[in-house]
Amino acid sequence: MDGWLCGTGCLRVRVSNDSVDTKYLYFYLRHPSVREWIVRHAHGATMANLNTAILSACPTVLPPLPEQKAIARILSALDDKIELNRRMNETLEAMARAIFKDWFVDFGPTRAKMSGRAAYLPEHLWSLFPEAIDPETGIPTGWKLSRLDELVVLQRGFDLPKSKRQNGNFPVIAASGFNGTHNEYMVEPPGVTTGRSGVLGKVFYIQEKFWPLNTSLWIKQYIDTTPIYAYFLLQNIDFSSFNAGSAVPTLNRNHIHNLFVPKPNIEIIREFSSLAENLFNLQYRNSKSSDDLADLRDRLLPKLMSGEIRVKEAEKMVEEVL
C-alpha cells in the first residue's frame, strides 16, 4: 500500500519492536475468534467503540519471528487467490453487463445494421436483431414497450426477526444485500431482489436457495423473460426516483410495475441469458472457492500457532488447494 490516512473512526496499530511481523499481526487480528473477543470487549450497546486500552489488552499469541513470517506467507497465498477470484468475478459481471448494455440499452447490433457496419456477432445472433429503430418508440422495430409487470412481478419479502433466526445454510437477503443465514428458505434459485425499504437501488442475483427479508422486493414471477435478464433490467432503473418514503427511503412496487421498458423478442433474451449464465456460473464457483479458502485460512492460523500443524505440512496443504 502507498501513502494512506487513518481517520478518526479507526485505530492505527503500530509494531513496537522487531519481534513481531506486521503481516502476521494483520492475520491474527482479523481472525474470527480475535474479532469476537474485540467485539465482546468493546464499549457501547448501540454503537460499539474500541479504544487503545481495549486493543492493547487483547491476548496475543506470538510464535518465534521466523514462524510468524512463514505463517504470514502461507496465509497470504490463500488471500492472494481470494483476491484473484474477486477481481475475476468483477470482470465476469462487467462482461455480462457490457453485452446487456450493447444489446438492450444502446441497441448496438441494430444501429450497426442501420449504418452498414459489419456484423460483430455470430450469424445466428446477428440475424435476431431488427434492421431499424422505430422513430416513435425509439426502440428496435418489432420490440414492444411493455409495463414492467408484463415481464416480472415483484413481491414484498418475508418477515424474519433476528430473534427468530437460526444459523443455517440459506442466505438471508436484505435491502443492502447479504444479512446472515437461516435454517429455512423461502425462494428457489436463481432469484433476483432489490431494496424496498432503507436502501434503494441495489439489485442482487442469488444462485442458491434464500430468504428475502421484508425490507426487500423479490421477483415472484418471470413472464417471457429470465432471472438473469431481469437482474440487469432492474439495474438500469433509477429506483431512487420512485422513493415513496420520507425519513426512510421506501419503494412501492406498484409504482415501478407501471414503468414502461423495452421488451425484446424472447429468442434474444434467451440467447443473452445463455451467455450471461455461463459467466455467472463461473463467478459462483469462484465465490464458493473463495469461501472454502477463507475457511481454510481461518482454520490454519490457530493450528499453526499451537504447533498442531507444522509449517511444511501447511505449505503442502495450501499448494494442493491452489
Image (cartoon, rainbow, N blue to C red):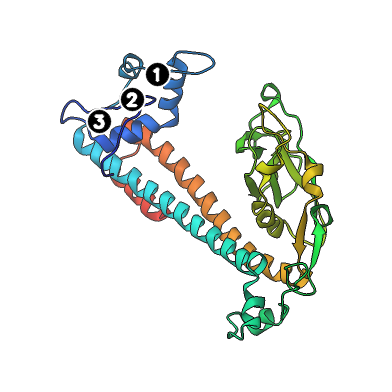
Residue at point 74%, 60% (across, down): 226
Q: Which is nearer the N-term, disc 2 or disc 1?
A: 2
In front: 103, or 13?
103
Write down the quadrant of residue 18 in the picture: top left
Q: Could you give the CA–CA distance between mark 2 and mark 1, rounded to whole angstroms?
A: 8 Å
Q: Which residue is mark 2?
A: 11
Q: Is residue 213 above or below residue 188?
A: above
* Residue 9 lies in quadrant: top left
Q: Secondary structure at mark 1?
A: loop
**Rendered view: 317 above or below 310:** below
Please give the label number shown on residue 50. Answer: 1
Q: Please state the horizontal and vertical placement of residue 66, each as a whole percent of the image.
A: 20, 38
285 up-or-down from 292: above or below: below
Residue picked out by circle 3: 63
Q: Amino acid at mark 3?
A: Pro
Residue type for callout 2 = Leu
Q: Quadrant of the N terminus?
A: top left
Task: State which mark lies toward you, 1 or 3.
Answer: 1
Residue at 63% across, 67% down: 106
Residue 312: x percent and y percent?
Answer: 29, 46
Q: Position of residue 193 (x, y in %)?
A: 69, 45
Give the Cα distance between marks 1 and 3.
26 Å
Q: Indicate the quadrant where residue 264 lies.
A: bottom right
Q: Residue furthest front?
A: 136
Tags 2 and 3 in contact by the CB under 8 Å rule? Answer: no
Q: Secondary structure at mark 3?
A: loop
- Mark 1 or mark 3: whose residue is earlier in sequence: 1
